[in-house]
Image (tube, helix red, strand yellow):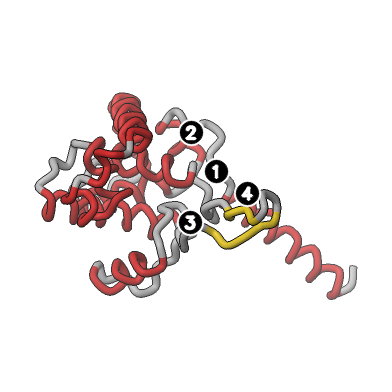
Amino acid sequence: MGRTVKFALFIFCSLVLAGCASAPPRHVDNICHIFDEKDGWYKDAKKATKKWHVPIATNMAIMYQESAFKNTAKPPRKRILGFIPGPRKSSAYGYAQAKDETWDWYKSKAPHWGADRNDFDDAIDFIAWYNNLSVKTLKIKPSDTYRLYLAYHEGHGGFARGTFNSKAWLKATAKKVSSRAARYQAQLNKCEDRLNSWWPF
């Protein structure tokens, strides 16, 4: 087999493996299955919680709502005349759906200059960091996923002004995120000892 063919096979296999690594989990409704499938995700989620003091279940529920664990998720494009693809509604991108300016703010304040929005480790740290700011700035309890999600979606200023009060759809979504976090936590209670035996640090 020639060097060119070997190199081509290497590139092909690398792309296939990379695609598998970044694909969303198959069983998104069970956090234990997510962490079993995605090597390293529990370690990353636990590290973020230890650093920013917001529960794993809350951070993961918010990530699911924002991107369904798709690492290159983007907002849909606006349609011009109903069918011509237009600009996207915002610069939100990645697992956490963080906008450009918010991500730059995180990188400078966390600080985390090398962070990428399509990297799970960085994205879960961002969500936990932002939730920690909500706890400190808005006096929301770390376990109050409902209000943390409203603050995540509306921003700290918007939450303080109560912009969510006129958005029944957003409050309904926040309830779904809160319910998912509670479900994730109940599941995690049953498998975390086992997960910790894999990741003792």
Marks 2,4: beta carbons within 8 A: no
Q: Nearer the viewer, residue 8 or 123?
A: 123
Q: In the rendered image of this protein, does residue 44 appear above or below residue 143?
A: below
Name the one closer to the observer, 34 or 43.
34
* Disc 4 to disc 3, C-alpha distance: 16 Å
Residue labelled with disc 3: 94
The answer to whether residue 191 of the structure is visible from this angle is no
Q: Earlier in the sequence, mark 4 or mark 3?
A: 4
In-image side of 146 versus 63 (left or right): left
Q: Which residue is mark 4?
A: 20
Q: Is residue 37 above or below residue 8?
A: above
The residue mark sitting in front, 4 or 3, is 3
Q: Are marks 2 and 1 in contact (CB under 8 Å)?
A: yes
* Label 3 Cα crowd, 10 Å radius (few <14 / some 14-19 / many 20+): many
Residue 83 coordinates in the image, percent (x, y): 70, 51
Instruction: Using a 10 Å C-alpha cutoff, classify the residue at mark 1 as few (fewer than 14 neighbours), some (14 to 19) or many (20 or more).
Output: some
Residue furthest out toward the front? 81
From the image, state whether disc 3 or disc 2 is nearer to you. Answer: 3
Q: Amino acid at mark 2?
A: Val
Mark 2 = which residue? Answer: 28
Q: Taking 176 as reference, is 110 above or below it?
A: below
Choose the circle earlier in sequence order: 3 or 2. Answer: 2
**Image mark for residue 24:** 1
State the mark number for residue 198.
none
Q: In the picture, residue 123 is in which quadrant?
A: bottom left
Quadrant hosting residue 179? top left
Secondary structure under the numbered disc 3 in the rendered image: loop
- Crowd rating for badge 2 (residues with CA inside 10 Å; few <14, some 14–19, many 20+): some
Looking at the image, which is closer to me, 89 or 186?
89
Looking at numbered disc 4 in the image, what kind of residue is underneath it? Answer: Cys
* Residue type, label 3: Gly
- Whether residue 140 appears in this view of the structure is yes
